[in-house]
Structures are given as structure tokens and as C-alpha cells.
Image: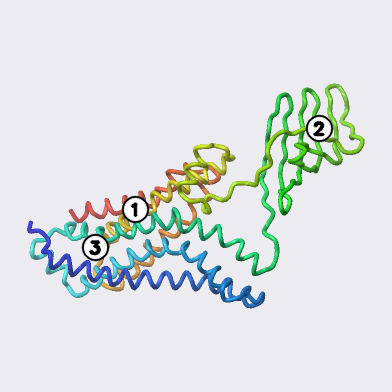
Amino acid sequence: MPRVPLTLTRSVLREVLRWYAAGLALFLILQLFDILSGTVGALLNYHATPVQALAVFGSKAPTVLNRALVAAVPFAVLLTLGRMQGDSELKATFASGVRPLSLVWPLALPFVLAGALAYVNAGYVVPAGLASWEPVWHSIFRDAPQVPSQDEYTFSSGEALFYAGRVINNAGGGGAQLQGVLVQRGDEAVTAPSGTWDPRAKTWTLQGAWITRPGQDPHPARGELTFPQPDTLEPPAPRAENVSTPALRARLAEGRGTPEETRADRFELTRRLADPLTPVVFAFAAGVLGLLLRNRAVSFAATVVFIATFYVLWISLPPLARVGALAPALAAWLPNLAFLTVAGVLAWRLR
């Protein structure tokens, strides 16, 4: 079998890149318009300044770039091959003895750069943008940022065990409100619906507490109860999406998060490694699929199905990883594995 002529490879790549630029612009505009339609009302009602409006869109724009970088790949490859099928260019190419799969491999080469851009964007630019979005948004509404809180707090100090169902940091720092409190000291258990945490005095003060001791009925405490609590009050860790890749690695190495937070961190870190390979995987999968399609209309329909399948996987897998239904690494790599499997089956038919 003869090799693919260099002029043919250049011609195909040139057309693919033209469609890729058009698709990238299209998907960016569609997603940015979605952000615009969801925020323009609030910006107008609260008289946001042009600087504030630009800050809102600037902080959100990097989050849509990676999706556009990926979605534009099957758009470009399938439309290019669909046009070539419709004009019988592929038939002439294969009739000359060129193997179909030898035309697919070069399609993945230019998208290595797209993957590198996606890696830098997801690991550094997107976290910085998301971290800056909330302060800007609250400045438009002229209100204080949401009070940070953490759930299922537990701390052991000697023979004492401290538990709070929810810890709500006071605005401006300096303390926290406790909800659903349990303090266990030896055989004595003290429960209370609420309390306060004073980090300077290193104490918990409980209101409406009940005391339970072995062999006795629970009875209410007289007034407030104060317990020494030496732990340090810290604000909850930011979401994994708001943390840069080096900081996320360091946070995982410390291992201080809850199981759910650890799963979210592992998924986000693994996805930042898997997603940059997605443009290359999609180029191969779309290239193999495009060689099997026979006209432009079918290629356009395949593009819609291809992109819709990607979005379904991309949106549905993160919650499954966070709750433990799927291993974080598997959830992060599953879209690439799924499309590689499909591409492998289709390539076997073209061999």
C-alpha cells in the first residue's frame, strides 16, 4: 500500500484547521452568550460598572475554553471528511491504494497543541478565574460573601471528643457558630442544638445543653457550658475547581480533607491530566467515524451525537466521583476510554 501523499495530508489538515477555528469560535460564542443571558439582568438591575461586568465575564471565560477546545475537534474532523465523502475525494484516495487508517493518524497531530493549552488553562487560569469571580459578584450585589462553613466536624483531645454537625464561620472571622453539638468526656456525654467557638479563648460554649451519664436519665444543664477546645479554627478549604494544580497536589499530600473532599480533589487533579488528551482522542475517534460516513448530512448528525455524548459524560461523572459511586481516576478517564473503545471498534472495521 502506498503512503499518503504529503500534499493530500496538508490539504486535509488545512481544511480541518479552518473548520476547527470556526468551531472553536462558534462554541465559545454560544457558551459566553449563555453566561451573558444568565447575568445581564442582574448586572443591569444592580447598576454594575463596565469594569465589574468585564471582571465577571473575564473570570468565567476560561471555564468555557476547554469545553470549546474539545467540542470543536469532532466538529472540524467530521465536517471535513463528510465534505470529502460527498465530493468523492475519499473514494478516489482509497482507489489509489491508500489505506484509510493512514489518513487518520495525521489528524491528531495539530490537536496536541490544543491539549497543551487545555492543560495550562485548566490547571492555572480557570482556578484563578473562579477564585476571583465570587468577590466581584458580591461587590455588584453590595453584600457580604457567603459565610464559609464545614460539615461533620470531629476533633479528639485526650479523653474528650468534640463533634459538630455544622460549623459556620462568623463574618469577618473571630469565631464560629456550632450546630448539632456533642462533647464526650469519659462516661459523660453532653449534647446541645447550638453553641459558639471562641478561637482566642480556645473554648466551646454550649447553649441548651443536656447531660447524660451512665445509670442516669438525661437532664438539662443549668445555663451555658464551656469546654476547653485546643483545636484551631480554620475556614473550610476552597473547592477543588478553585485551586491550582500545584496547590491541589499539596492539599492531597496533606490528607486533611473529608472523604468527599478528598475524592473531589483526586477527581479534579486526574481530570486535569485526562482532559488535555481528549482533543487527540476525539481527533482519532472522529477521523475513524468520518471515514465510515457517506455524505454531509450524516456527518453533521454524527457531529451532534458525538458532542452530546461528550457533554453527558462530562457533566454526569463528577457527581458520581464525589459521592464515591465511581473511583475518581476511573470517572476522570472514562470519557477518553469510552471514545477510544468506539474508535478501536471502528478502526477494526477499516483495517
* Quarter of the figure with the N terminus: bottom left
Answer above or below: position of 98 versus 193.
below
Q: Residue at x 35, y 69 (%)?
A: 301
* Residue 65 % position (x, y): 42, 64
Say which residue appears at 77% left-offset and 26% top-offset.
Answer: 185
Neighbour class for label 2 at 10 Å: few (<14), some, many (≥20)? many
Identify the residue at horizontal 85%, vertical 37% (top origin).
Answer: 209
Which tag, 2 or 1, sits closer to the chain's start? 2
How many angstroms separate mark 1 from mark 3 (CA)?
24 Å
Of pointers 1 and 3, the one earlier in the residue sequence: 1
Between disc 3 and disc 2, the foreground one is 2
Label 2 residue SS: strand
Vertical comparison of 339 with 167: above or below: below
Q: 123 or 267, which is in the foreground?
A: 123
Q: Are marks 3 and 2 in contact (CB under 8 Å)?
A: no
Are there few (<14), some (14-19), or many (20+) residues within 10 Å of tag 1?
Answer: many
Q: Secondary structure at mark 3?
A: helix
> Residue type at mark 3?
Leu
Image coordinates of residue 162 in percent, x first then y, are 73, 33
Label 1 close to label 3 by CB (< 8 Å): no
Relative horizontal placement of residue 262, taking residue 293 as reference (left or right): right
Q: Which residue is mark 1?
A: 277
- Badge 3: few (under 14), some or many (20 or more) residues near its Cα, within 10 Å? some
Q: CA distance from mark 3 to mark 2?
A: 70 Å
Residue 240: x and y, percent? 53, 49
- In this figure, which residue is indicated by the disc labeled 3? 292
Residue at position x 72%, y 54% in the image: 171
Task: Please indicate whether residue 213 sits to the left or right of residue 309 in the image.
Answer: right
Mark 2 is on which residue type?
Val
Say the numbered circle drawn on residue 190. 2
